[in-house]
Amino acid sequence: MKFTYIKSEIKGTEVPQVVFENLFDARNNDLKVILYVIKNEVTDPLKISSDLNISHSAANSSLLYWADKGIIMCQEEFAEKPKKKPALTTEIIATFANDPGVQALCRNLQVIFGGGLSERYTNKFIALYIEESIPVDVILQICQHHITIGIDNPSYIIKVIRSWHTKLGLSTGSQVDEYLALCEKRAVAYKQVCKIFSMDFSKLKSSEKKLIDFWVEKLGMSFEMIEQSYIRAGHLASVPYCNGILKNWAQKGFKVPSDLQAEISNIIQSSRNIDTQDDIIVKGMKDVPTFDE
């Protein structure tokens, strides 16, 4: 739907009377939305939902509410965008008969999927190469990886290929190999940290995974240091809490447990030096003659 704010003759951002008349009937989101519209003269539900941090349906519902009160005009949008009809695999192959990339894809996809890939999905994979310029080796390597780990859903794999290419910038087979190696290394780290923290690996949050990546890849912390942070935290131990401890250690240049031991030794030695100084002062005080003497 398309919405238009019917602005009154009043100047500035004063609130129209109709808003006050519906204060008790309107819901919280309704008031937020109309005040936003009055101030910004924006009636796009997507923009409103983003700026006010409410759902798109909530923004749309509020706009409909005020449309019923006559302060916003609502118009149905019947025009639909024409859908692009994908060409059949046979037509694509005929058009690019001499393209070795298309031939390699058709041949290897059937091998990777064990001959069970339909023409429809073959067409979608070829479109990744022709229309989105994703290299053949990138497509095939990502397909092979997912089949190896037991994921054989073509729709899901196509989304992953597109995401890794556009968001992660994986444009060569070697980059895919490096990223997969990094993912494997991260998986090992997640499991090791879960073991240290006595956590269920399946319940590890994405935010916690990012912190673990930060510890290992940015701070260069070993699992021994991570374990020491867990011990230091005591009953407060959690991934976010230990993140503060590890960042503090990194700022001090601590990388291995022996660095922590050296810090403890320095603290103990400093304490002993203070005690020694106190003993000297006390002894000196004893040697000072009193008035009685």
Image (cartoon, rainbow, N blue to C red):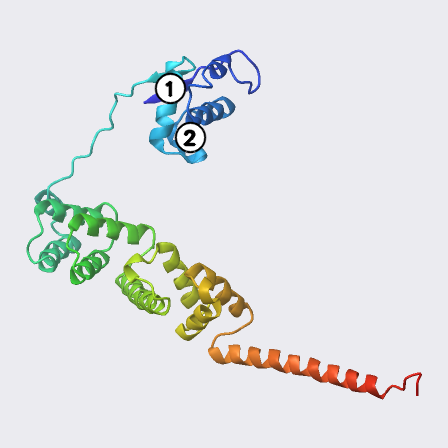
Secondary element under disc 1, as helix, strand or loop, is helix
Residue 280, position in %: x, y? Answer: 77, 86
Q: Position of residue 143 (x, y in %)?
A: 18, 57
Q: Residue 56: x and y, percent? A: 35, 32
The answer to whether one can see residue 49 in this image is yes
The residue that disc 2 covers is: 48
Q: Residues within 10 Å of mark 2 (few under 14, many from 20)?
A: many
Query: In the image, what residue type sits under mark 2?
Result: Ile
Q: Earlier in the sequence, mark 1 or mark 2?
A: 2
Q: Nearer the viewer, residue 269 or 109?
A: 269
Decide if residue 52 is on the left or right side of residue 269: left
State which mark lies toward you, 1 or 2.
1
Q: Amino acid at mark 1?
A: Tyr
Q: Secondary structure at mark 2?
A: helix
How far apart marks 1 and 2 lie (CA) works out to 15 Å
Choose between 69 and 40: the one closer to the eye.
69
- Indicate left or right for 274 with 202 as reference: right
Q: Does 291 sit above or below residue 22?
A: below
Q: Residues within 10 Å of mark 1 (few under 14, many from 20)?
A: some
Picture disc at residue 65:
1
Residue at (58, 81) in percent of width and height: 265
